[in-house]
Each structure stands twice: as C-alpha cells, then as structure tokens.
Amino acid sequence: MKKLLSILMVFTMFMAAGLKAFADDAQEALKFFNSYVAAANSYSPAVASMYAPNAKIIRQVVKPDGKLVDVTTDTATYIRQMKLGQAGAKLRGYKNNYTNVSVASLGNGAYKVSSLRQPTGENYKLKTYMIVKKQNGSWKITEEMMQTKVQTFLKYANKK
C-alpha cells in the first residue's frame, strides 16, 4: 500500500509540474501576443522581428455577400507591405483593439492565440488568430490569420 501511495504521489507531482509548465508557457504566449499588439499599435519596427522567417500569413477577405476568401503570402512579402502601409496608418491614427483573447495549446510547444479584432473607427469585429512558438529561445509567429473587409486583397488571391 505504501508503495502504491508513493507512486501516486510521484505521479501527482509530475502532473502538477507539467500543468504548471503548460500554464507558464500559455501565459508567456499571451504576454508575447500583448507585446505584439502594443508594438503594432505604436508602429514599431520590432513587429517585423516577431514573425518566423517562414510564417504562413493569411488574410481572410470578408466579401460584401459574407463569403470568405483566403489570401496567403510569405513573411518577406507581408513585412514589405506592412512597412509601406505603416506611414499612412500612423497618419490616420489606425489601431486595432483585440477582445475575447484566448490561448490554446496545440502541442509541440505551439500555442494558438485567438481573438476578435476591431479596427479604429469601425463598429464590427473580425476573427483573428496567430500560432506562436519558441524558436531559438524567442517567441515567433509561425502562422497568422486575420479577417479583413479590405477588398483590394482579393487581387492577390490565387485563381483556381
């Protein structure tokens, strides 16, 4: 009986340590997301370094009829476009407000941070998520999906 109790106690300690590690990493992922929001809303050049070099970037265009069209791009193209758009965004005071933020483990050290994004001056909210993972000791965005109502993104959609 003592042996069984000892085994159960050791198992419980390992489980508690594992849950704490998950909670710590989930909190770190959330902290990284919040630092991304702060950097993006202040037009910081640091945003570019928050993406993995091979991140999958998805802009999901919400068409006027409600249909969704995914437009994907690579990290380098996205960063280039983002830098071009920052000056105009800064002049307009454009920012995003994020609500309903949640973090879920995807396993293998990756976390999905989901939220609703409300652009400045708009009364609607759009779905967004980013998958973040530590790479070489730093959190990086490995995938990002943001819905948008900006129809000009459709010109970059793959025609099938």
Image (tube, rainbow, N blue to C red):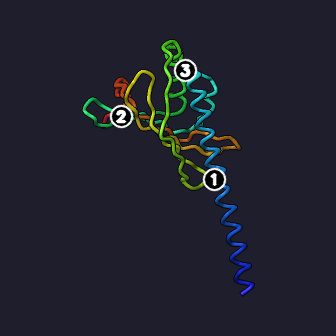
Residue under numbered circle 2: 158
Q: In the drawing, does residue 25 fall left or right of residue 153?
A: right
Residue 20: x %, y % from top left: 67, 57
Q: Residue at x 54, y 53 (%)?
A: 106
Assign the C terminus to one quadrant of the image. Answer: top left
Q: Position of residue 54 (x, y in %)?
A: 56, 38
Q: Quadrant of the N terminus?
A: bottom right
Q: Is residue 48 above or below residue 9?
A: above
Counting residues from the start of the chain, the first of labels 1 and 2 encountered is 1
- Give the class, few, some or many, for how many residues have Cα within 10 Å of label 2's Cα (few <14, many ≥20): few
Disc 3 or disc 2, which is closer to the eye? Answer: 3
Amino acid of disc 2: Asn
Q: Residues within 10 Å of mark 3 (few under 14, many from 20)?
A: some
Q: Which residue is mark 3?
A: 83
Name the amino acid, label 1: Ala
Q: Position of residue 46 (x, y in %)?
A: 64, 27
Q: CA distance from mark 1 to mark 2?
A: 39 Å
Residue with the mark numbered 1: 23
Numbered disc 1: secondary structure:
helix
Q: Nearer the viewer, mark 1 or mark 2?
A: 1
